[in-house]
Amino acid sequence: MLLAANIVVALIALLHVYILVLEMFLWDTPKGHKAFNLTPKLAADTKVLAANQGLYNGFLAAGLFWGLYLGLGGNHIKFFFLLCVLVAGIYGAATSSKRILYIQAIPALIGLALLYLAVN
């Protein structure tokens, strides 16, 4: 069960690296416009804000990778950062796009459940 939990944690971490790239580097490109349903003007006007969001997503990924790196001793760290991803996903779904619930919050919830089952 721990292997399954770690795979989900790694996938969520990689997802947040991808979100970092989209928000920090591709926000004002056709790929960024499509991913976030942006007009070119809105993307240009919010580019700095998006880069800030991307940095926060990078911190989430770093925390998850850190927990994975620590092995069994990192389970508490993985649990904490998965909770952060879950809260961010719920908040994003409530305030921005329901899609975030499926992309971010539900995978984090699955990761939390697998991690809980693995350690108990």
Image (cartoon, helix red, strand yellow):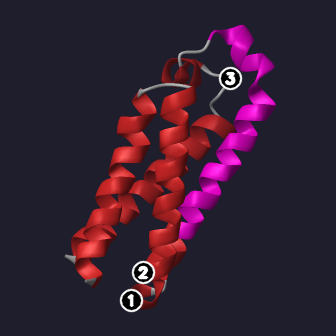
Q: Amino acid at mark 1?
A: Leu
Label number found at residue 72: 1
Residue at 41% x, 86% y: name it.
Answer: 71
Sequence-first disc among 2 and 3: 3
Q: Position of residue 35 (x, y in %)?
A: 50, 24
Q: Which residue is label 2 attached to?
A: 75
Whether 41 is among the magenta residues is yes
Q: Position of residue 65 (x, y in %)?
A: 50, 70
> In this rendering, is residue 114 above or below 97?
below
Q: For the residue carrying disc 1, how many other residues have a C-alpha within 10 Å: few (<14), some (14-19), or many (20+)? A: few
Q: Amino acid at mark 3?
A: Asp
Residue under pointer 3: 28
Secondary structure character of the magenta stretch overall: helix
Q: Residues within 10 Å of mark 3 (few under 14, many from 20)?
A: many
Apparent side of residue 73 relative to residue 61 in the rendered image (left or right)? left
Q: State which quadrant residue 28 falls in.
A: top right
119 and 72: which one is in front? 119
Q: Which residues are magenta?
A: 39-63
Q: Which element carries disc 3, helix, strand or loop?
A: loop
Residue drawn 55% across and 39% down? 91
Q: Is residue 51 magenta?
A: yes
Quick one: 92 or 57, which is closer to the camera? 92
